[in-house]
Image (cartoon, rainbow, N blue to C red):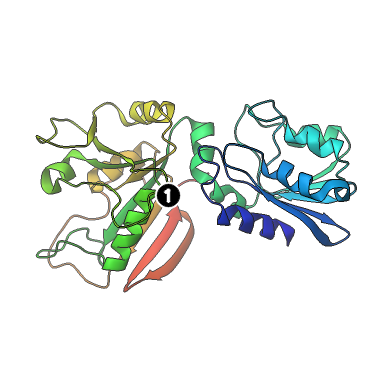
Amino acid sequence: MSLARALELAAEAAGRAYPKPTVGAVVVLDGDVVAEGVTERGGRHAEVVALDVAGHAARGATLFVTLEPCAHHGTTPPCAERIVAEGVARVVVGARDPNPEAAGGIEALRAAGVEVDVLDAWEARVQNEAWRVWVSRDRPFVTYKVAATLDGRVAVPGRRWISGEESRRVVHELRAVSDAVAVGMGTVRADDPRLDAREVEVPRGQPRRLAFGRGPLPAGSELELRAGPLDEELRALAAEGVQSLLLEGGPTLAAGFADAGLLDKLLLFVAPVAADGDGPSLLTRLRSPLALSHLSARLVGEDVLLEAYFQEP
């Protein structure tokens, strides 16, 4: 129950610690919550915030934390050392830290005699999914966003938009929290998209706007051309600090990412309409079948938003 509260705290503060992960922590003694904490912007980690509030009540307590406490000297001292020093008896970890530079807190705590339970909870991993892929795979977390008809077409003759107004607003919200947004050159030539976030709050500034493929870009285009192999371009973007990439390109570009194993998440807006004729489908022909997991669905206006994962973060 207290890990659920720690997850709730982290969700409420989502993005606060960017480009670092946002973590929630709860200290429980004799069944009562005595302290809570969330990673501060550019400052203390959630565990330290909670332990500072708990004071002497931390001794013999259980600490619930959404991410493995760090074991290295970075911008702050190791959280694992602080937990041991405060006399915490047990730590419940939502997910292991995939960062090789910061991992090892679980082992350090156990070596010091602290009981540690690692839940490896899906909810804890997806809270910082982009950061997890970025630090462990040296590339951005790639989400393929696409709108389609009931019969799987991504274009309808005579209609500019497939999805409704509410869905389009969600897309702008997605852009606002993504480090980069991308399309292929086919989409650039056909639609000349802006790819910026409009009429929504943009907490970290506009995303980088990219075009994958062979140029040249149209005169006056504000997009960045990325013409190299996809894996090399993603590594370069990761080195430049891009943790999350929202892919809005057409089915050919999406299939290229899929065949290269570079898609992580699918966001499919299904509109209550059937296409008239043989329009383009969600993906062009793939080299092999794709299996997705953790499928969920919710209504967005009159559309249905399907969310699923190509691979787990």
Residue depicted at x 28% and y 54%: 198
Number of numbered callouts drawn:
1
Quarter that holds the N terminus: bottom right
State whether residue 117 appears in this view. no
Position above or below: 246 against 147: above
At label 1, the amino acid type is Lys
- Of residues 246 and 147, the one nearer the viewer is 246
Residue depicted at x 12% and y 42%: 189
Q: Secondary structure at mark 1?
A: strand
Q: Provide residue 299's location: percent of width, then percent of height.
A: 39, 71
Q: Provide residue 141's location: percent of width, then percent of height.
A: 44, 41
Position above or below: 257 against 199: above
Q: Provide residue 262's location: percent of width, then percent of height.
A: 39, 38
The picture quadrant where one finds residue 281 is: bottom left
The answer to whether 237 appears left or right of 5 in the picture is left
The answer to whether 15 appears left or right of 94 in the picture is left
The answer to whether 241 appears left or right of 5 in the picture is left
State whether residue 300 appears in this view. yes
Position above or below: 155 against 20: below
The answer to whether 57 appears left or right of 78 in the picture is right
The picture quadrant where one finds residue 95 is: top right
- Residue underneath mark 1: 265
Q: Would you call the spot at circle 1 few (<14 residues within 10 Å), some (14-19), or many (20 or more)?
A: many
Q: Provide residue 108's location: percent of width, then percent of height.
A: 79, 32
Residue depicted at x 35% and y 26%: 232
